Image (tube, grey):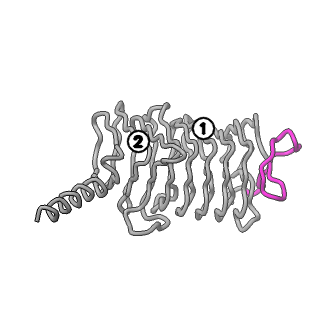
Amino acid sequence: MKRHLIALVALSFCAAAGFAQTNVSGAITTNATWTTAGSPYNITSDVTVNTGVTLTIQPGVTIKVADSSSLLVSGKLAAVGTSSQPIVFTTARSAPAAGAWKGIDFRSTSDPTSTVSYVNIDSGGWSAGRTMYIAGSSPHIDHVTISTLAGSAIWIDLAAAHPVIDSCTFNGGTAYGLYVTGGALEVRNTTITNFTNYAISVGPGIDVLDASNLTSTGNGGGAKNNIGYRGGNMGGLKHGARSDSRGTFLPASLSPRVGRSRSSQE
């Protein structure tokens, strides 16, 4: 009897330790940390990080997001994983599904020191048409993988937007890898594959500050592995890029022109 009791206690402890989970929704009004002990975190409806508030997510944490829900950042997001313990954002469904949930939105009031690093994101897009929306803000995005998505991986919008995107992988969306309609583009060391349209779409008057060491394949059926601008010229190319026949983006200094489309609205 004693042996059976010890076994039951051990089983209960393992269940508590191995299957902890935390449901979250609504506004985060004070600084908060999502820990591995509380993982996975189930976003059951929109979560908003309020202005002046920091949400820290520890390495190895998994966030499961309900259909049509988002993480909205008006304050600061510090989601910093590691190569061996990435942070994971995924659907609450039993398997990844493109467009199951909306995505991560950085609003214009978000802290410019926000960081998303070593994070794997799948199943975003929903009806919003992008997994990450950066509106007039400047987070640092590095070592982020975005896959199994509806729409574009990242949409950069509004004049004040100036995110830095470094060492990322974007794969398999139904629009563009990067869709830029405002602010400035600074992207390097990044791979963009298998989107239905251009690898990168840049709107009129956008400053392309860096687009170096990029690899692009399979976009637009293999015909759009470059930067497509939508009307007008790009505003200020300092370290631009073009696509060669292999889909690898080269520094502009190696070519007299920037790889781009002459189409106005493709």
Q: Give the camera-side residue of 203 and 68.
A: 68
Q: Pointer 2: what residue?
A: 58
Q: Residue at x 37, y 34 (%)?
A: 54
* Quarter of the view holding residue 109: top left
Q: Residue at x 59, y 42 (%)?
A: 182
Q: Give the camera-side residue of 109 and 33.
A: 33
What number is the disc on residue 164? Answer: 1
Q: Which residues are magenta?
A: 242-263
What number is the disc on residue 220? Answer: none
The answer to whether residue 62 is left or right of residue 1 is right
Q: Give the camera-side residue of 32 and 132.
A: 32
Query: What crowding class fits label 1: few (fewer than 14 Cα within 10 Å), some (14-19), or many (20 or more)?
Result: some
The type of residue carrying mark 2 is: Gln
Mark toward the start of the polypeptide (1 vs 2) = 2
Q: How many marks?
A: 2
Q: Residue at x 16, y 63 (%)?
A: 3
Query: What crowding class fits label 2: few (fewer than 14 Cα within 10 Å), some (14-19), or many (20 or more)?
Result: many
How much space separates mark 1 and mark 2, taking CA atoms? 21 Å
The image shows residue 86, relative to residue 96, as above or below, that is above
Q: Tell me whether circle 1 and circle 2 mark residues in contact (CB < 8 Å).
A: no
User: Which part of the image, by quadrant, shows the C terminus?
Assistant: bottom right
Image coords of residue 27 (percent x, y): 29, 43
